[in-house]
Image: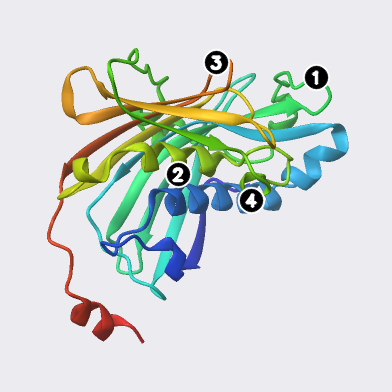
Amino acid sequence: MIDRYRHAYTITASDMAADYTLTPTAMLMYAQDCFARMMTLCHVAAFDVIKDRRMWVITEYTADIQPATAFWSEEIVVELWVSELTSLRIYADFRILLSGGRQVASGAFQMNILSTETHRLEATDFLQGRFAVVPEMMTPSHKKQRFPKPATPLAQMEHRVTRLDLDFNGHMGNRGYVDIALLTLPDEGLRGQRLARMSVHWLRESHLGDTLRCTVSQADGDTGSYLHTLADAAGTPVCEVLTRWVPASPTPDIAEVLTRLP
């Protein structure tokens, strides 16, 4: 029975940010992909549970991000394990490591099983015995995140959901919300800063043609923390993102980058 799963990935150019770090959405993608691969080995992946009119959804995610450069064509390893299984929720913890063992990010996320017919939560009893649960490796980051109330807006933007935003479930993919949230932050506020922590709470689905408005405000008076609230046309929140930013190290010179490429 699998208790900890590891998978190696090769960094692509689109995974790198301008400061030669992994983008936040790439980290989320790798963590989710690793979970999907583990569930495939346990015979409860998306294409397994759909036969019983069930689907996987991610509802919460938290990542602590280290200031580690990650270059194109380098290898990273994702380690992932299930640390808690309740009657309705599955908590997975993860680490993203460079090939030399240096940590890029760590965190946890919450998965749920939904009925494709009612979109209500399904019991997780059918997952019992499919994989090992290792509570001794639980991280404190998957305690329920309490998001602050929105304050005076610092910036806003609208996004209309297009075909490019949709995933195989037919609604907006979860990484799209993160991209919109980060894009709403004014560029001048990010100079010399790096993202150190991100928490995401997905609340509702968005579909083709929906208009989303993202509003960014300072979180609890902390000049380095921001609350990003994405709401639908009726003003109902569909996703909340809490980010914390800290001073960044100097970006490596391009000559250093080129010497590291094979």
Which circle's residue, 4 or 2, is located before the other in the chain?
Answer: 4
Q: Which mark is residue 236?
A: 3
Which circle's residue, 1 or 3, is located before the other in the chain?
Answer: 1
Label 2 belongs to which residue? 179
Left or right, residue 230 beside residue 258: right
C-alpha separation, residue under disc 4 versus residue under disc 3: 23 Å
In percent of the image, x 46 and y 69: which residue is there?
12
Label 4 belongs to which residue? 164
User: Which mark is in front, 1 or 2?
Assistant: 2
- The amino acid type of the residue labelled 3 equals Thr
C-alpha separation, residue under disc 4 versus residue under disc 2: 13 Å
Which circle's residue, 4 or 3, is located before the other in the chain?
Answer: 4
Q: Are marks 1 and 4 in contact (CB under 8 Å)?
A: no
Which circle's residue, 3 or 2, is located before the other in the chain?
Answer: 2
Q: Is residue 23 visible?
A: yes
- The amino acid type of the residue labelled 4 equals Leu
Q: Are marks 1 and 3 in contact (CB under 8 Å)?
A: no
User: Which mark is in front, 1 or 4?
Assistant: 4
C-alpha separation, residue under disc 1 versus residue under disc 2: 29 Å
Within 10 angstroms of label 2, few (less than 14), some, or many (20 or more) residues? few
Q: Position of residue 217 (x, y in %)?
A: 29, 24
Q: Secondary structure at mark 2?
A: helix
